Image (cartoon, helix red, strand yellow):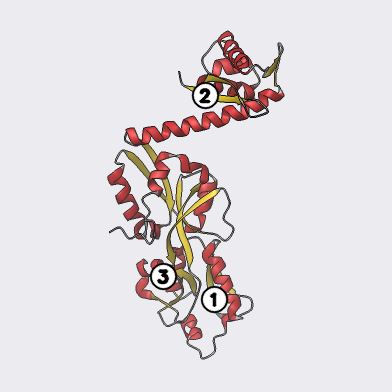
Amino acid sequence: MYRTLRCVFCNNGSYLVLFAMDIRSMNLFQHLATSLHFGKTAAANHVSPSTLSRAIQRVEDELGSQLLIRDNRSVVLTKEGQQFLAYAEQQIDQFELLKQSLNQTQRTLLGSLNIYCSVTASYAYLPPLLEKFRQAHPNVDIYLDTGDAADGIEQIKSQRVDLAIAAKPDDLSSSIHFQHIASVTLGIAMPKINCAVKKALQADSIDWASVPIILPEHGVARKRFEQWFRKKGGGRPNVYAQVSGQEALLSMVALGFGIGLSPIVVADNSPVKDHIEILPDTLIPAFDLGLCCFKKKLDDPIVAAFLSMVPQDSGLSFN
């Protein structure tokens, strides 16, 4: 039985007593403090109510304090019980972290990892990470879901995936961990075919308010475009369409429906790359691309192992 040691001190700081307490008893107390019902906690932990009662009594005897007020229908935590609950939860968390750390060094990682990214990221940024991870941890199953890059953070928040490759928003939640992978350069994509859009862009003085624009539905790229357009002083943009996904946006640009903001890496690898070009002299701030997860997931050995695959200086150069 696993036990933890705790020192109790007098008010003047002198040592008073040292006692041992098993993790199992702490787990039982933690569950009981939540359920406030001996029968429910006993059933959930596969012990008899009398065994549970004796375990709680031992904890109270070791502490020399009453932790619960019991009657036939309910259980209520005393002030001392609330204090001990906070201590027990801390010890349980520390013990679980220790187990994970020991398991990580003593045996092969087993389990699964769910990742979300855009189609472009799946071939432009993910392969070197996956290759390095698979070599180190061949027994972890990888599940990859692709979609609009702007939805990466939301995929994390909704807990659909463990990790996502996403652009770093200006208002990143404090609960989200972001690990930089690359700085993504942006440009304004325009059609190569002879069309009204191309002619408007070849004018000596471009009337930006009349140029049809294809925008992402949401996300960092859209905000970057709106900032760039305001600096142009073009007034209200002439939005032709709003689309989900950079690949669809570039297809519409190639057909001559309008212009649109695109990461250069997406434009360079697009199936329609021969039918689009980047408008010269369009200086648009790059955005940070990185791996995202809930900060609480950093204690997960598989998530931590995958994050460790990213080079310290980023840029994804695996030499």
Q: Which residue is mark 1?
A: 212
Q: Is residue 202 above or below residue 277?
A: below
* Location of residue 91 (image quadrant): top right
Q: Is residue 245 above or below residue 188?
A: above
Q: Quadrant of the N terminus?
A: top left
- 100 or 266: nearer the eye? 100
Q: In this view of the protein, can residue 271 be seen by the observer?
A: no
Crowding at mark 2 (Cα within 10 Å: few <14, some 14-19, many 20+)? few
Identify the secondary structure beneath mark 3: helix
Q: Which residue is mark 2?
A: 5
Tell me which numbered mark, 3 or 2, is placed earlier along the sequence: 2
Residues under labels 3 and 2: Cα distance?
A: 58 Å
Measuring 54% from the left and 23% from the top, which residue is drawn there?
27
Q: In this view of the protein, can residue 256 be seen by the observer?
A: yes
Tell me which numbered mark, 1 or 2, is placed earlier along the sequence: 2
Measuring 38% from the left and 44% from the top, which residue is drawn there?
305
Q: Is residue 304 above or below residue 285?
A: above
Tell me which numbered mark, 3 or 1, is placed earlier along the sequence: 1
| Percent coordinates x, y for residue 51 in the rendering | 55, 10
Q: The residue under label 3 is which amino acid type?
A: Ile
Q: The residue under label 1 is which amino acid type?
A: Pro
Q: Quadrant of the C terminus?
A: bottom left
Identify the secondary structure beneath mark 2: strand
Q: Nearer the viewer, mark 3 or mark 1?
A: 3
Identify the secondary structure beneath mark 1: strand
Measuring 58% from the left and 80% from the top, which residue is drawn there?
232
| Percent coordinates x, y for residue 140 in the rendering | 34, 40
Q: Nearer the viewer, mark 3 or mark 2?
A: 2
Q: The residue under label 2 is which amino acid type?
A: Leu
| Percent coordinates x, y for residue 172 in the rendering | 57, 55
Q: Which residue is mark 3?
A: 264
- 32 or 64: nearer the eye? 64
